[in-house]
Amino acid sequence: MRALITGGAGFIGSHLAENLLKRDWEVNIIDDLSTGTFENIAHLENEKKFSYTIDTIMDIKVMEELVDRADVIYHLAAAVGVQYIIDNPLKALQVNIRGTEIILELANKKKKKALIASTSEIYGKSDKIPFSEKDDRVLGSTHISRWGYSASKAVDEFLALAYYREKRLPVVVVRLFNTVGPRQSGQYGMVIPKFVHQALLNHPLLVYGDGKQSRCFAYVEDVVNGMITLMEHPQAVGEIFNLGSKEPITIEELAKKVKELCQSRSEIIYVPYNQAYEEGFEDMKRRMPDLNKVKKLIGYEPQFNLDDILERVIEYFKT
Ligand code: UDP
């Protein structure tokens, strides 16, 4: 079997590529290296069943050829990271909307099964705990770039479901919650790689807002295994699934934990949101997935807890 992974040199994409290769799949990735890096896939370069294309998914000719060669498509290429979205609002919308449209259009032409990676940002600033797949979305004003990202991924989901309902294209949509692990960069805003990197350098850890906001962090391997198992399950087709972990921690506690595990002398400094991001920035106080749907269908259960994750991320940054 041959898989095409868009965004395959990204953090999650490169782990997915590695995992599929271990299962003896042929893996081809495409990445424009906007947030992904060649380093993420350098260790796969000599694998016989691995190939890569450095190009944009916005080029239909390039994509047509790649889709032709694949049996299934994992569409992970997207603009991600709260900081990245705020810095590149136009690119985020174009890649997320037009890019996904191209993938679905071509997948449909060739009738290739596709997984569309979506996000927990879909739920917006809803205060419901936990979020389940059919919950309402609560978004703020269009002046705030973060909600443009959320809306763009919602368009992706609408497109995927429309292709499934109208054209019978086999699609699976996964909403990824905070996913972390080695190779994730802190450059685009993600808190764990940022804190670990700063702590190891004894630089200040910047906690945004009052630090009482909480997140549940999932290990990339758990998430990637979930994606692959869903793609293999016939009843996942035409459905949307949350994927992540249910172990919450406040960002303030996270900063303290990272500092301790890194034996760091870093100061913990609180920074108001509008200073950290942009004027009017809105954050969600809590974010936790309801994982019952994915658990029921494929028995999904995260195998790694936060301590396991931090241990691996710290090791990665040290080396
Ligand atoms: N955050 C923080 N300091 C940082 C980066 C992020 O306090 O240096 C906070 C951020 O405001 C959010 C949480 O950590 O409340 C998780 O941020 P991340 O960007 O990793 O994920 P998301 O906001 O998408 O959940």
Image: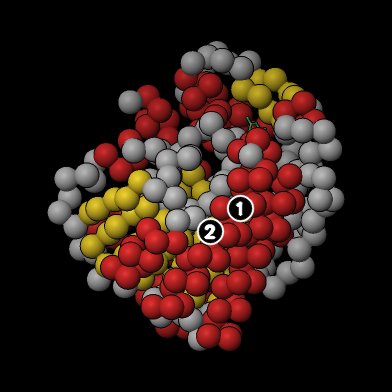
Q: Which residue lies most toward the front here?
A: 61
Q: Which residue is mark 1?
A: 94
Q: Which residue is mark 2?
A: 99
Task: Determine contact: label 2, label 1, CB under 8 Å.
Answer: yes
Indicate which quadrant contains ligand 1.
Answer: top right
Tell whether circle 2 marks a residue whose Cβ is less than 8 angstroms from ligand 1: no
Q: Residues within 10 Å of mark 1 (few under 14, many from 20)?
A: some
Say whether disc 2 or disc 1 marks the residue closer to the N-terminus: 1
Looking at the rendered structure, the kind of residue marked 2 is: Gly
Horizontal relation, residue 293 to residue 4: left or right? right
Q: Under tag 2, what secondary structure?
A: helix
Q: Residue at x 39, y 78 (%)?
A: 110
Answer yes or no: is residue 299 visible: no
Towards the viewer: 275 or 223: 275
Q: Quadrant of residue 314?
A: top left
Please tell me whether residue 24 is drawn above or below residue 297 in the rendered image: above
Label 2 and label 1: CA atoms lie apart by 7 Å
Q: Position of residue 137 (x, y in %)?
A: 76, 63
